[in-house]
Structures are given as C-alpha cells and as structure tokens.
Amino acid sequence: MKLGGLQKMTLLDFPGRVACTVFTVGCNFRCPFCHNSSLVVSPEVPELSQDDFFAFLRKRQGLLDGVAITGGEPLLHPDMPELLRKIRALGYAVKLDTNGAFPDRLKAILDEGLADYVAMDIKNAREKYELTAGVRGILPQVERSVSILMGGKTAFEFRTTLVDELHEPEDFAAIGRWIGGDEPYFIQGFVDSGDILAGGMHAASPEKAKACLEAALPFLPKARLRGQD
C-alpha cells in the first residue's frame, strides 16, 4: 500500500477526535469533481513511508487520539486491515472514508472492530451514479455497503458532495428515498482544490444547496449542510 501524504492535525475530519489524516494512493472511481486527483491517477505522487508514518504516530501519542484514513480509496488496498491493526495497537481510534465499492473488505474490517467510524460517499441518485462516479457497474457494490453500514453497529455517516453540474434537488429526494432513515447525512459543497480530475465543475449556489437539503429532509431528518450548521 502506498501512502501519499499526511495532515498532521485536524479537528474536522474525525467527529469528536483530535486526529491526523493519512491519504492512500489510488482509486477505482473517476469522479470528475475529485479534488485529490493526483492521488487517483498519478503514480509519481510523493510517497510517505509507513515507517515515517508510524514514527509520527508514536511521537503524537497523548496529543492525538484518532487517525482518519482517506484517499483515493483506502479499501482498494487488500492490506488495509494490517495497517489498521498497527494503528489501533498504538491506542488510536480509526475513521475510515470509503466510496463503498468494496463491501466484502468493509464488512471484514467492521467485523474485526478495526474502525470506530465510517464516512461513506453517496455520489448521487441511483440513476446518475455511473455518471457521477465515472465508472460503470458499481451500483450493486455500493448498495451492499450501504446495507452493511445500516445493519451494523459501527458509527457512520453518509455524505454527498454537491456539484452544480451533476446534482439537482430531485436527486437528493431520490437519495433520501434510497438510504432514508435516522442516520447522519451531510451535503458538502464542492471546492476547487486546483487538483480536480476534470474541468468545468463548480460549486452550487447557497440557494441550490438549501433546496437540495430541503428535498432530502423528509426522508433523512438528520440531513445537514456540512459547514453551515
């Protein structure tokens, strides 16, 4: 597994924890709005060695209490459980970000108790999933990951990045009908990081974001606009 970077402290990425964020390299999706595209497509991205990563974690014991693992797609790597075991052996809680494409790997991690919190992306309504994820044939795996999280005991959230060109309020009503329940759901605004996979992507207006939230709320009463509470 290749690690592509480390954010040494965050108060935002892992709810309720003072954490660091580590980035894995590689992803099986090609979302046109991806803001970490160098991690997705570039084999030349600078690598963070696991030795350096764990040396950092050992130095920060007592100062940090969580590690958020994002990407790319962390579950693309079959050796992810080994990494998680080593992190937990140092006393850290683990938050795992995932696109939901690897339900068997997700279930195995949850069954072993290797993650304390999971954030899963819901890219769009079912009818627009392939367009938004940039790949075909992925929806059955995503649906299974949704069911695993909703049927399990691990704390989790679902989240959708709102992109003006890809989403309309009716898409969020469809998402709500699909995953509707009492679980936390966040609509987060697209931000152009300068490392976007495709051009022509823009943030939605505050008015459109509010309309999307209002479309989701009848089905997802805990839906929120992230960063606008």
Image (cartoon, grey):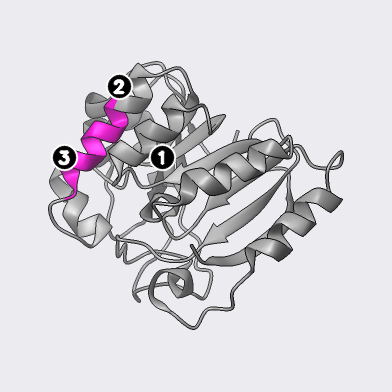
Q: Residue at x 78, y 57 (%)?
A: 56
In the image, residue 15 sits, relative to residue 25, either above or below, namely above
Q: Residue at x 63, y 44 (%)?
A: 86
- Which amino acid, by three-letter code, is at mark 3? Pro
Q: Secondary structure at mark 1?
A: strand
How many numbered marks, from 0 up? 3
Q: Position of residue 211 (x, y in %)?
A: 36, 38
Magenta span contains residue 83: no
Question: Residue 220 or 88: which is nearer the viewer?
Answer: 88
Q: CA distance from mark 3 to mark 1?
A: 15 Å
Magenta span of residues: 138-147
Residue 180's tag is: 2
Mark 1 highlights which residue?
Answer: 120
Which residue is drawn at the image coordinates 51% and 66% (left, top)? 2
Residue most extreme to the bottom? 44
Can residue 227 be seen in this snapshot? Answer: no
Pointer 2 or 3: first along the chain: 3
Residue 155 place in picture, x, y as percent: 51, 24
Which residue is depicted at the point 49% across and 31% down?
Answer: 224
